[in-house]
Image: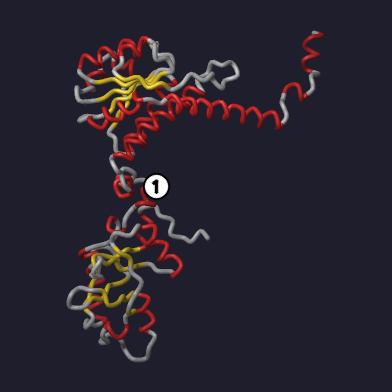
Amino acid sequence: MTTAVARDQQSESDVSPDDNWILNRAREILRREAAAIEDACEKLDSAFTQAIRLILACKGRVAIAGVGKAGDIGKKIQSTMASTGTPAYVLHPVEALHGDLGMIRPDDVAIMLSKSGTTEELVRLIPAVSKIGCKVILLTASRQSQCAKLADIVIGIGDTPEACPLGMAPSSSTAAMLAVGDALALTLMDITDVGPEQYAAYHPGGALGRSLMLVHEIMRTGPNCPTVHRDATLQDYDRVVRQAPLRAGAAVVVDDENRLVGFFTHGDLSRLLGEPDHPAKRRLSDVMTASPKVVNMNDKVADALALMQPHGIDEIPVVDDDHRVVGMIDIQDLLTRGFSVFDEG
């Protein structure tokens, strides 16, 4: 009883460290993990270049396998590779040994991850994968391990002590393993010259895809881009706008060669209706907005939105390099694609 009371009477400082201790501990963990990455960097050798050349020559895909925390790191490496132009998939070692090995093809390359290099499932999996004809790259801290002896290429990740207080939980090793995996994926991306447009194609959803989307991917074309000749009347404008399958609030005005000469909107029409003389017979060339703001079909949608927002523009014409009309952007289409059309400034 006395012991229990004594524990209850311990000061709070004995139980909960102060803020400085917490911050210093966090910084120390980050320094240890940074040191692990630096160690991996210093230990990179010709095995890394061999792995890069093997993957570049691969006619299939990259299979990535690991168990436990190494498997989690493998999933992230796989997603990075897939999103940067290197086709890759995750192969779960246990499931592979029970049938999923059928996913592997002889022209694939396998990347195995194991800090110790003694992971039982990988010791069994590597020979099976090699028998199919697939080359194996191993990321490990132990170049002399059983897995290392079975693999075709062994990339060392260093052997810095774990940042865990017990020195046991994977932390420094997984940081180094992830960094080496990123180095593989991003070096491959650099060599294969993946540009912004190709990268955007791999990320069609979410903010990332929207930030790289090009105007021609979202613009309205054909019947959904109401177009009238400069000699047309307001009645003609009303007709083409009504005929557009998608609700339209404007029409582009062109010359004989389909070059943009103006833009006319419902807002312009509303202002004209306030005039004393009935405007229906007036020519668009007399009432249109000449030299309107435009975007090129190869501009980024984000740049088009940045042009539209400050001026309160709901529709904007899209032209090609010869200033010929190829489409129109409507603010409603941006909304449906998830763009924030409201000025956040």
Q: Is residue 313 above or below residue 287?
A: above
The secondary element bearing badge 1 is classed as helix
Instruction: Give the percent coordinates (x, y) of residue 325.
Output: 24, 69
Residue 227 position, x and y percent, is 23, 72
* Extreme residue in the bottom direction: 277
> Where does residue 207 sit, x and y in percent of width and height?
41, 48
Instruction: Give the residue drawn at x 33%, y 65%.
Output: 295
With 180 as the anchor, is 245 left or right in this view? left
The quadrant where residue 334 appears: bottom left
> Residue 312 sits in which quadrant?
bottom left
Residue plotted at (23% across, 74% down): 259
Comparing 343 with 37, the one in front is: 37
Residue 85 appears in which quarter of the rendering? Answer: top left
Q: Is residue 226 left or right of residue 269?
A: left
Which sits in the foreground, 239 or 117? 117
Residue closer to the observer: 189 or 294 = 189
Count every numbered label the image shows and give the total: 1
Q: In the image, is 221 to the left or to the right of 64?
A: left
Considering every residue shown, the one lying at the far left of the view is 256
Depth order, front residue of 33/228: 33
The residue beneath circle 1 is 208
Give the crowd class for mark 1: few <14, some 14-19, many >=20 residues within 10 Å: few
Q: Amino acid at mark 1?
A: Leu
Q: x, y percentage for residue 177?
A: 43, 25
Q: Residue at x 35, y 27 (%)?
A: 48
